[in-house]
Image: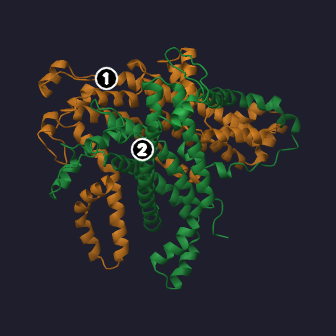
Chain colours: A green, B orange
Amino acid sequence: MTNAILEIPEARAPDVPVRRKKELRGGWSAAIWFLLPAMLGFGLFILYPALRGVYLSFTDWNLIANEGEWVGTDNYERLFGSDWNNVKHSLWVTFKYTMINIVSQTFFAIMLAVMMDRLTKSVFVRGVLLVPWLIPNVIVALLWVWMLDANLGVVNEFIGWFGIEPVRFFTDTGKVIPTIAGINTWRHMGYTALLIFAGLQTIPKGLYEAGALDGATEGQMFRNITLPLLRPILALVLVITVVGSLQVFDTVQVATGGFGNRPGGPVNASRVIYLYIYENAILFNDLGYAAAISILLVAILLLVTFLQLRLLRAGESDLA
Amino acid sequence: MTVTTADQIEAESFSEVSGRLEKNRKLSVGRAMAWIVLAIMLIITLFPLWWALRTGLSNNGALFAGDQSLGPAEFTTLNFERVLGQATEAEIFEATGRPNSGSFDFLQSLKVSLIVATVITAGQVLFSAMAAYAFARLTFKGRDKLFFLFLSGLMIPPIFILIPNLILMRELDWFNSYQGLIAPFFFMTPFAVFFLRQFFLGISKEVEEAALLDGAGNFRTFFGIIVPMSAAPIATISILTFVTAWNEYLWPLTVGRDPDRQPLTVALGNFTAQQPGTSPDWSGLMSATLLAALPILLIFFVFGRKVVDSIGFSGIK
């Protein structure tokens, strides 16, 4: 889903229809057989549920009885009224997580991409960097839960050599979100670096040669050539990072929910918005209210994507 | 933060390499530094996997005694054997001093993961390819509008359609069933349609037209010419689809509540949740974790290049 987001801005260029073979190529009578399964799947599992989700947000649907009654705007009044503090808290936690991710992921990814571009085009290096991205979130979470364990974790053992007290990465309310953001950075930095690396390949090498002749340093060339020409890619990377981070769930659920703890802990410090929706839907069996919160999330996602693409003028490159 | 700490771990072992590089005057200091940083990043990337393997091959008792050696602590393969159901209760008790606590049926979950990911991949790639072909090559009224509608599906967060889809599963009575785990991903994803359409658009039309003039129908043209010509992108999207299906967590977590229908991701999460906080079975957990990642790692080992190359394609165009 995340890498797919990229495609929207450029996806619409229609190709020229084949006119000569109109009797075979044209018309719904030919196309329908190719489209039927995909349309069925799209209609049944994407379009219909999306519309139904809007309807559900006006009901008090209960999954056990599997029925619900129309309650008007009750769910929305609760969302922006009595429950607003909880929603606000979850949004805030998600926002913090997203901000940390943007900074750390973009930093490491650009660094890796530029180093690969300058040092090696090796597929092996790129392959190794991509490994964490292919591993399930659940497994990534478990690897780090063990490495960062407060008593036996190897990371605490290591920082102990420097006289630092063991850090309670997952049980300290101030550290749990940065910790999970760090884990996510570990998983995604290679993938993001590869996207940026592919973008770097589109920058003409002549520009760097010209820059070098003019006596520009590596730093100056990075600021004045690389960054401006990478802007379309960076805009897309940013959208992917933000949209993905706003929807974090697996890692939080597994990393904070182990060993009998309640996911989202300690004391709701990591209860991101996805987890709050999940809790309302699955634990509290209040699907109508969960649908209302997820509509708020959809609105936020659309707004953020739109703003980012606008602000970063994603479509245009400075390579004119 | 986590990344920088792990960073520091590796910095030490590399001081030796850095010293060697600095002696080589031909290499600029900047380049040498960059190589070192890149090497450190590669080690940070792989170290957690090594640590999981090392832990899986260790004795739990030695781990709890605080053994942090780089290699296995009191080497044993018992953990992998018990995850795979190959160890007897007596062996486990003798080695760990306690009964086999909080285990789960790894092989059953492996079977579920394999069935679900394989069926999803087969269906999704076939049907998405057919739709992509129609969008790329056939002409029909409202084609671009329909394509745009498909693409807009990308903007819908999974949790939003998860809730109504759960209700649908309840209505169909598909909870705890393979149909329920598979159906929402079986027919298409907007991404697969988009990815394949981009490729089909690039195929020269002349090849197809020759076939059409020879009297081949649209289906024969598609399966006989387009699909064989597109073997590479179809393989790539199949790998990506399989990996995504294998990694899926939220949907099976809500639909597959019966242990017999839980894929590895869900079973592992539950296994962790049930572990005692005071002395979790770390070596068992890490063996299971690594084994659950193994199929993905194997696929990547065999087809790595395709996946790596596809990132540039899917990411930029």
Residue B188 lies in quadrant:
top right
Q: Where is residue B275 drawn, in percent x and y? A: 25, 29
Chain that bears disc 1: B
Image location of residue B274, percent across then percent down:
28, 26
Mark 2 nearby-residue class (10 Å; few <14, some 14–19, many ≥20)? few
Between discs 2 and 1, the one toward the N terminus: 1
Helix, strand or loop under label 1: loop
User: What residue would you read off at disc 1?
Assistant: B104
Q: Is residue B139 above or below residue A62?
A: below
Q: How many marks?
A: 2
Query: Residue drawn at (49%, 45%), measured in percent from left and top?
Result: A246
Outermost residue to the bottom: A214
Rendering coords of residue A82 (x, y %):
47, 34
Q: For residue B56, which quarter of the picture?
A: top left
Which amino acid does the dot numbered 2 rest on?
Answer: Phe
Q: Position of residue A185 (x, y in %)?
A: 40, 51
| Residue A53 found in image quarter | top right
Which residue is disc 2 drawn over? B301
Q: CA distance from mark 2 to mark 1?
A: 28 Å
Around disc 1, counting alpha carbons within 10 Å, would you say few (fewer than 14), some (14 to 19), or many (20 or more)? many
Whether label 2 touches label 1, CB < 8 Å:
no
Which chain hosts label 2?
B
Vertical placement of residue A243 versus B248, above or below: below
| Residue B65 in the figure: left or right of residue A140 | left
Q: Is residue A80 in view from this perspective?
A: yes
Is residue A79 placed above or below A7 in the rendered structure?
A: above
**Three-letter amino acid code of the residue under disc 1:** Phe
Tell me the SS state at disc 2. helix
Foreground residue among A172 and A41: A172
Kindly identify the residue that appears in the image at 60 percent across and 60 percent down.
Answer: A311
Quadrant in which the N terminus of chain A appears: top right
